Amino acid sequence: MKRYIAVWGSIFFFVVCCSLYLMLETLSMQPARPDVLNEYDLDSIEGKIKRIEGDLQKNQDTIRKIKDTVRQIAKGDENGIKSLKQIFDDAGNNGVVRMDERFKDNILEVLVARKAVSIAEGMCGLQDAPEAKTDVKMLRVFDILPFDNPDGGVWKQGWDITYDHVQQTNQKLRVFIIPHSHCDPGWIKTFDKYYTDQTRFIFNNMVAKLEEDPRRRFIYAEMSFFSVWWDEIDNSMKERVRKLVKSGQLEIVTGGWVMTDEANAHYFAMIDQLIEGHQWLEGTVGVKPVSGWAIDPFGHSPTMAYILKKVGLRSMLIQRVHYAVKKHLARNKQLEFLWRQQWDQAGSTDMFCHMMPFYSYDVPHTCGPDPKICCQFDFKRLPGGKLSCPWKVAPVPITDKNVAERVRKKEELCDYQYDLGVGLRL
């Protein structure tokens, strides 16, 4: 079989080579045509390109003049009608705009009859509107930030944090712990591989652990994974999940089909995936999200804040922005804000937003500026596992003994501070 293929392949190759040779030989014997040479002459091509560029520039100039004149008419200047007619005539004479005379007359008649152009409700007529009144204008912040990344000490992307160990306070520190899970429907693994390796087990354990203690909470965002798991579980498990949702132990955040990209995605796609997730939730679990959760898109868009406001969400959380922006807002205590669209004069688009201050949304960067403190409570990084704490302070398993040890150390510190004449509220 191999010899048979090799013989026919050789014959085919020989025939092709001979055909190409005969074709080139025939072409080389034909006399040259001067008109063909002139058509493809480089100077001629360059001249055509210049003429096209000139026509494009004329078109752009004409469109700009039309826009300026329409704005003039919208402000009530009737002379703008004459200016617009002159622009149409000049454009037609120059060959820039070829417009049917009846169509042109109809446009002018409408403008004359109305004597002004009004923007229909819901359309964008905001380019001439004044800027919205806000305390922080991010476009101006971007102009003043150096966007450098100096070493901030234990808080690498911030600044050195110090505190007084013996400072007395009558205020208790309230700590909010938000257990969550995030797997990308598309990243290193395939969607199915993420589900079978990780996400399925997360959902199963979530139900078991929430039912063990009614004080526990869990949030989840991506309905693409959740819907696959929902189709696998039986009716008994579905009722258990609905009960957890109703009690508030399990909260669905954002509720989109994915945690959408906000930098490159078109707003049609951002809305479409949100509709997909919300319709699925309403038809199966019977719940509507009230908060947004966007911890992993690389950059955040005001478009998403606007969309979430329009679909009825009350608040949102974001994470991945440039470190210089986080540091600037942290210094000014502005990490929580009402996100207003820059064209919104009345504040109708205001969306309450919390920006996470530190590097990431993992355990080491979510309990304070010093990740080596936080990492001691990341029990996935216990010695012997795949992950470790790069800050050289490893977590240890919680036991009655080491809990008692920590309590004893606090009591010793308290006694020491009272000896110094200062009070400490534990």
Image: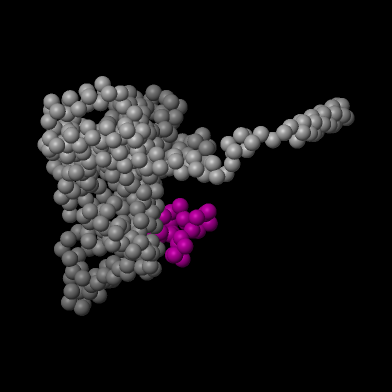
Residue at the location (29% across, 46% down)? 317
Residue at horizontal 17%, vertical 54%?
135
* Quarter of the C terminus within the rendering: bottom left
- The magenta region covers 373-400
Name the foreground residue: 128 vs 404: 128
Q: Write the residue at 15% across / 44% down.
A: 345
Q: In front: 209, or 324?
A: 324
Which quarter of the image is occupied by the N terminus? top right
Q: Is residue 246 above or below residue 377?
A: above
Is residue 210 among the parts visible in the rendering?
no
Horizontal and vertical percent for residue 261?
39, 42
Horizontal relation, residue 270 to residue 21: left or right: left
Tell whether 189 sits left or right of 66: right
- Between 240 and 354, the one nearer to me in the picture: 354
Magenta stretch prevailing secondary structure: loop
Q: Examine the image and state in which quarter residue 129 appears.
A: top left
- The number of callouts visible is 0
Residue at position x 18%, y 34% in the image? 82
Horizontal and vertical percent position of residue 293? 32, 43
| Residue 92, x across and y down, in percent | 32, 31
Visible in this render: residue 8?
Answer: yes
- Which of the 4 image quarters holds residue 252? top left
Q: Nearer the viewer, residue 291 or 409?
A: 291
